[in-house]
Amino acid sequence: MAAAKPTVARPLVDPFARAITYLRVSVTDRCDFRCVYCMSEDMHFLPKKDLLSLEELDRLCAAFVARGVRKIRITGGEPLVRRDIMTLFRSLSQHLDSGAMDEVTVTTNGSQLTRFARDLYACGVRRINVSLDTLDAAKFRAVTRWGDFDKVIAGIDAAQAAGLAVKINAVALQGFNDDEFEDLIRWSHGRGMDLTFIEVMPLGEIEGQRADQYIPLSQVRARLERSFTLAPIDYSSGGPARYVRIAETGGRLGFITPLTHNFCESCNRVRVTCTGTLYMCLGQEDAADLRAPLRAAPTDEPLHAAIDAAIARKPKGHDFVIDRASSRPAVARHMSLTGG
Ligand code: SAM
Ligand code: SF4
């Protein structure tokens, strides 16, 4: 019999009556890739002294769990390049064992999975997201600038062998992978993996024009309907993706459409960066510093007060636009800081 969920004394509920039960934690802004839509080639990273230690990140996560967060996604930058990151996963697994939390998961570029897949499983992780935009090794190198396709595929193999369910995330990029959508579906589903397409979002300055990269997923979907039968399903992985089942493959396909379909009304999440900055919305600048209250006292009361004040300001939604008239990013920070 499943253990009863512990009662949460002060659950986090925002002004629009949305309960905050999902925390995304970016544990580093650094990465071993330089994906063209995510980073510029000469990124400047945060000085190490600004980062929360793994112990502080753990304390921060525990404070959110105490307030009713049931799911934590570890992301980045590339989370698996942070030194000793498995100690954080090990510590978070205690909340899974106690029943205080349902899930710890990770979004990764896959480059370190041959090393860490088994450890992740041992820490209670059961599902992971791996970002892979193309099945062509040369194109993979071009889009990630520094990535090694074979290493990522070996990482996905290792993850599946370790018992982790893998979901592939692919950013839909005009003129880059728009000829591969059908292949990505057949390949992912053929390996028993879900696949999600993501619309490129205007986050951070990059080289080149985002309008050149952007394809609305409504267009992608209309095109896929010529080759496949797409049946909408009720499935939710707890995030913003809307899913269909592809009759021909039997697999699930998700669409994350921040631009063509705003998903804010059901938003249950907030994001914290590796410096302890809490973003109440991926698409807005407003943020709250949790590092100072975290360090102010050995007790968590200042931290809880700061979390309460922040959640009380969670906005109704974002207002991303990508068009040629608005060539500036909607939000100046890169996705690698806030986490995907
Ligand atoms: N490094 C890890 C990875 O690539 O999976 C985790 C962090 S990455 C920022 C998380 C996700 O955000 C990836 O799937 C990536 O493709 C996506 N991403 C990055 N920049 C984006 C952008 N501007 N628009 C849409 N998705 C983006
Ligand atoms: Fe790194 Fe992920 Fe950004 Fe690519 S998308 S540069 S792998 S953080």
Image (cartoon, grey):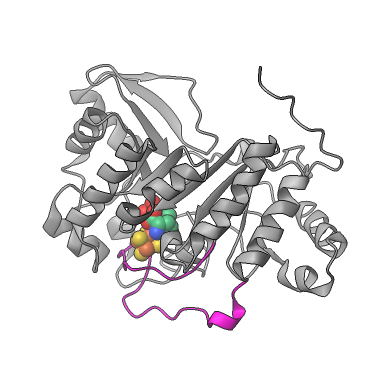
| Image location (x, y in percent) of residue 43 | 39, 78
| 181 w.r.t. 23: above or below | above
Task: Kindly identify the residue that appears in the image at 78 percent across and 42 percent down.
Answer: 13
Residue 101 in view in this figure:
no
| Image location (x, y in percent) of residue 125 | 49, 42
Q: How many marks?
A: 0
Is 42 magenta? The answer is yes
User: Relative to residue 30, is residue 276 drawn left or right?
Assistant: right
**Residue 175 vs residue 37, the one in the foreground:** 37
Residue 51 in view in this figure:
yes
| 196 w.r.t. 35: above or below | above
| Image location (x, y in percent) of residue 221 | 31, 32
Task: Kindly identify the residue that appears in the image at 60 percent across and 79 percent down.
Answer: 50
| Image location (x, y in percent) of residue 23 | 62, 49
Task: Kindly identify the residue that appears in the image at 51 percent across and 70 percent down.
Answer: 332
User: Relative to residue 163, is residue 177 drawn left or right?
Assistant: left
**Residue 128 vs residue 204, the one in the foreground:** 128
Figure quadrant of the N terminus: top right
Is 9 magenta? The answer is no
**Residue 292 vs residue 297, the one in the foreground:** 297
| 136 w.r.t. 37: above or below | above
Task: Kindly identify the residue that appears in the image at 78 percent across and 33 percent down.
Answer: 6
Q: Kindly report the secondary structure that dominates the magenta region of the rendered protein.
A: loop
User: Relative to residue 203, is residue 317 drawn left or right?
Assistant: right
Whereabouts is ligand 2, in terms of quadrant?
bottom left
The magenta stretch is 27-52
User: Relative to residue 145, is residue 199 drawn left or right?
Assistant: right
**Residue 108 vs residue 195, the one in the foreground:** 108
